[in-house]
Amino acid sequence: MKNKGKKKNKVLKIFLIIIATILALIAISHTTITIKTFVNYDYNVKVWKEYNHTGIINNQWDFKKLKYGFGNVGANGCGAVSVYNILQMEGKNPDFPLIIKQFDLCGENVFGIAGSKPSRVIRVLKKYGFNVSYSANKSKFEDIAKNSKYSIYVYFGIKDFVPFGHYQLIYNFDGEKFDTINITGKYTYKEITDIDNTFFTMMIGINV
C-alpha cells in the first residue's frame, strides 16, 4: 500500500512539474511577444518615416528594413501588406507600422517567421469596417474572387522541405484577368491559384 502511495505521489509531482513548465513557457512566450511588439513598433515608426512612401506597396521586398515579428516585411509581411494596400486603395490613409503592430501582438505564425495567420488578416479587416467572407473550399474560390471588390488568395506549402506561402491581393476582374498587387500585374484566375505543393489554401473576399 505504501509503495502504491509513493508511486501516486511521484506521478502527481511529475504531472505538476509538466503543468508548471508549460505555464512558464506560455508566460515567457507572451512576455517575449509583448516586448517584441513594442520594440518593433518604435523602430518601424522611424523607418517608415525614412521611406517616406505614399501609395500602395507593389513589392514587399522594397520594405525589408521594416521588422515583422522576428523577421521582416520583405520575407514575412505579405498579410499585413495586403491589409495596408486595401486600406490605401479605399483612401483611408493607413498607418503601416500600426498595422504591423496588430499582427505582431497575436497574429503571426512562429513569431512572424512563418508569416501571418489568416484569422488575424480577417479580424483586422473587420476591425477596419470591411465586410469579409472567406472559405477554404476550393470550389468557392473563383466565385468569391469575382464577386468581391477585393480578394486575397492565401496559400501555404512545402517544396523540397522548404516552407513557403503568400497573401495575394486580387481585384477588378475584367472578364478574363484580375489586377493583382504584390505580386503586381494582370493574371487569370488559374495563373493566380495554380500553385504546386500547397497544403493549405483560402480565399478571403472583402467588400465595403
Image (spheres, helix red, strand yellow):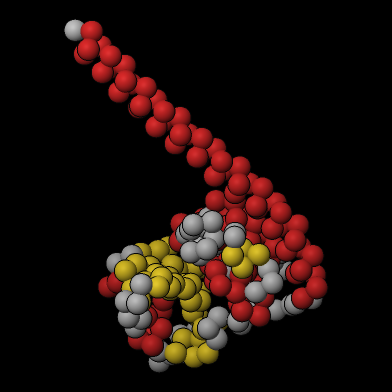
Left/right placement of residue 48 relative to residue 149 reads right
Check the image and report above or below for 75 versus 7: below
Q: Residue at x 35, y 86 (%)?
A: 190
- Rendering coords of residue 184 (x, y %): 55, 86
Foreground residue, 182 or 186? 182
Q: Quadrant of the C terminus?
A: bottom right
Q: Residue at x 66, y 80 (%)?
A: 62
Check the image and report above or below for 162 versus 192: above
Is residue 70 visible in the rendered image? The answer is: yes
Q: How many numbered marks does the figure carry?
A: 0
Q: Residue at x 39, y 32 (%)?
A: 18
Left/right placement of residue 197 relative to residue 91 reads left
Is residue 83 visible in the rendered image? The answer is: no
Residue at the far top in the pictured view: 1
Check the image and report above or below for 185 versus 80: below
Check the image and report above or below for 4 versus 179: above
Left/right placement of residue 102 relative to residue 141 reads right
- Rendering coords of residue 76 (x, y %): 55, 69
- Rendering coords of residue 194 (x, y %): 34, 83
Q: Residue at x 32, y 80 (%)?
A: 196
Residue 17, quarter of picture? top left
Residue 118, quarter of picture? bottom left
Residue at the far left in the pictured view: 1
Left/right placement of residue 72 relative to residue 170 reads right
- Rendering coords of residue 59 (x, y %): 60, 81
Q: Quadrant of the N terminus?
A: top left
Foreground residue, 164 or 148? 164
Residue at the far front in the pictured view: 3
